[in-house]
Image (cartoon, rainbow, N blue to C red):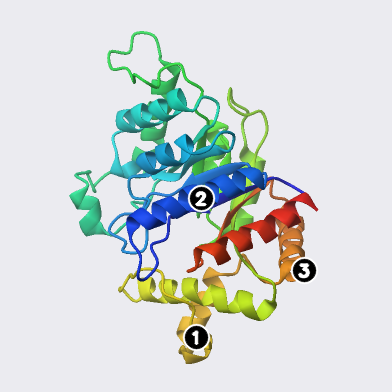
Amino acid sequence: MIPFSILDLAPIAEGSDAGRALRNALDLARHAEGWKYRRFWMAEHHSMPGIASAATAVGLAYVGAGTSTIRIGAGGIMLPNHAPLTIAEQFGTLESLFPGRVDLGLGRAPGTDQAAAYALRRNLASDENQFPRDVAELIDYFRGSEGRRVRAIPGEGLNVPVWILGSSLFGAQLAAMLGLPYAFASHFAPGQMIDAIRVYRERFQPSGQLDRPYVMLGFNAFAADTDEEAHLLATSLMQAFVNLRTGHPTKLPPPQPGYEETLPPQARAMLDQVLFCSAIGSPATVDAAIRAFVARTGADELMITSQIYDHQARLRSFEIVADSMSG
């Protein structure tokens, strides 16, 4: 089986807080290291009551200090929110602390709404070429080009693999042009997944970082000892998505029996679309779903995410998925 990795948003559950969410993230990363997951990534989101990974580099430093072998990284840093120099320094610092273990995934969405994006003090009027320019500038800081007046210290001369993240053809084209690995957000926006994979592979140009295309796909997994238990666990994420899409983001709610039956048809259709790339069920059900997904997409790696209310149940879900990876 191909490598599996973990995307963790450090979910803040109802009745809990950000401190507990981040400690749970470290606990999950430690278990994941033993289960042979390849990477543990955290994602940048802002002004979200249920996500504790807003200061992504800080969260990764905490996880890196508590682990020893698993790769840590951003999945991703929303580059429009930041000056490229700042990100080069942050991830140069991480690579200096945890050499050979750091990845940097870059996205062009703000990871928040317009009000929060403005609060980040970034220019919201940038053109469509700004993201490619910022990516190139960031990579150049790591290369340490001769004659550059502004230098990323730490960062300059360090090997921090850069990934392009996306949910459309834009990211696929950019990753292909730059010869970078590509991670597609199929765990919540699967609509253009197949087309994006095709475009990326067809147009890929080898680079100093990568000699052939490498695709990582996001995938939801809710695994439990029975199908019924797994479906109940998944209702927490379902509630969170409905709350978010209706303009009322919340902490991660506890599971709710029969939740789907309470929803109007349009909400059910939205969830069917959002959770299209998911495995929900017992170990056998999840294993079959993962294998079918890999066979259909030809993914080089899966980035597993599992927004489960109870931390112990979340650990058990990732453990079941790890058995599929090793089987």
- Where is residue 15? Give x, y as percent: 35, 70
- What is the crowding at mark 1: few (fewer than 14 residues within 10 Å), some, or many (at least 20)? some
Asked which quadrant contains residue 157, the reply is top left
Q: Return the residue at label 1.
A: 259
Indicate the position of residue 313 as horizontal and vertical percent values.
Answer: 57, 66
Identified by mark 1, the residue type is Tyr
Q: Which quadrant would residue 225 be assigned to in this image?
A: bottom right
In this orientation, does residue 159 appear?
A: yes
Mark 3 and mark 2 in contact? Answer it, CB < 8 Å.
no
Label 2 sits on residue: 27
Mark carried by residue 284: 3
Q: Name the amino acid type tagged 3.
A: Ala
Q: Which of marks 2 and 1 is in front?
A: 2
- The percent coordinates of residue 81 (x first, y second) are 29, 44
Q: Residue at x 74, y 70 (%)?
A: 285
* Vertical arrangement, residue 132 with respect to residue 285, above or below: above
Q: Residue 135 carries which label?
A: none
